Amino acid sequence: MLIFDFSDIGNRLYAVRKRMGLTQAEVAEQAELSSRTYADIERGTVNMRIETILRICKVLHITPDEILTTHEPSALPRREELLARLDACSPKDQETALHLLQVFLSSLT
């Protein structure tokens, strides 16, 4: 999912920069930005051009996806857990669970 909140993007940049042990001034210089502009970006108070994002990402050795998107947790592990629990049930309990699931899903529409 794409992130549109500049504050979230700034927080992500801050975390990456800190993890790399860089100062704002170092990132700004390498990205050919003023220190003030980079500080404003981390605070989430300015809108960035694509070129600016790409230069910052290059300095931090990350892809734009790492700061511009969020990955929703996969439902696969929960689904596998649910199926394993269902497999452990008796056939009669499985039929009951299936019926309850059908009733629940019908209520969503």
Image (cartoon, rainbow, N blue to C red):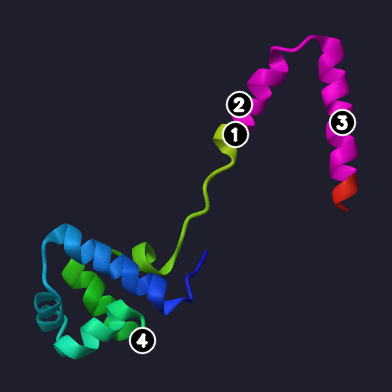
Single out the mark in the foreground, 4 or 1.
4
**What residue is shown with label 1?**
78
Q: Is residue 59 something one can see in this rendering?
A: yes
Q: CA distance from mark 1 to mark 3?
A: 18 Å
Does residue 81 show up magenta in the picture? yes
Magenta span dominant secondary structure: helix
The boundaries of the magenta stretch are: 79-106
Numbered badge on residue 45: 4
Location of residue 86 with respect to 107 vertically, above or below: above
Which label's residue is closer to the chain start, 1 or 3?
1
Q: CA distance from mark 4 to mark 1?
A: 38 Å
Location of residue 39 with respect to 71 vertically, above or below: below
Give the structural element (helix, strand or loop) at label 4. loop
* Residue at 75% in and 12% down: 89
Whether tag 2 and tag 3 are in contact, CB under 8 A, the answer is no
Single out the mark in the foreground, 3 or 4.
4
* Residue at 28% in and 69% down: 13
**What residue is shown with label 2?**
81
- Image position, residue 58 (x, y; %): 20, 71
Task: Locate residue 63 relative to residue 19 in the image: left or right.
Answer: right
Residue 39 image-quadrant placement: bottom left
Residue type at numbered disc 1: Arg
Q: CA distance from mark 4 to mark 2?
A: 43 Å
Whether tag 2 and tag 1 are in contact, CB under 8 A, the answer is yes
Residue 81 image-quadrant placement: top right
Does residue 88 show up magenta in the picture? yes
Which label's residue is closer to the chain start, 2 or 3?
2
Q: Residue furthest top?
A: 90
**What residue is shown with label 3?**
100
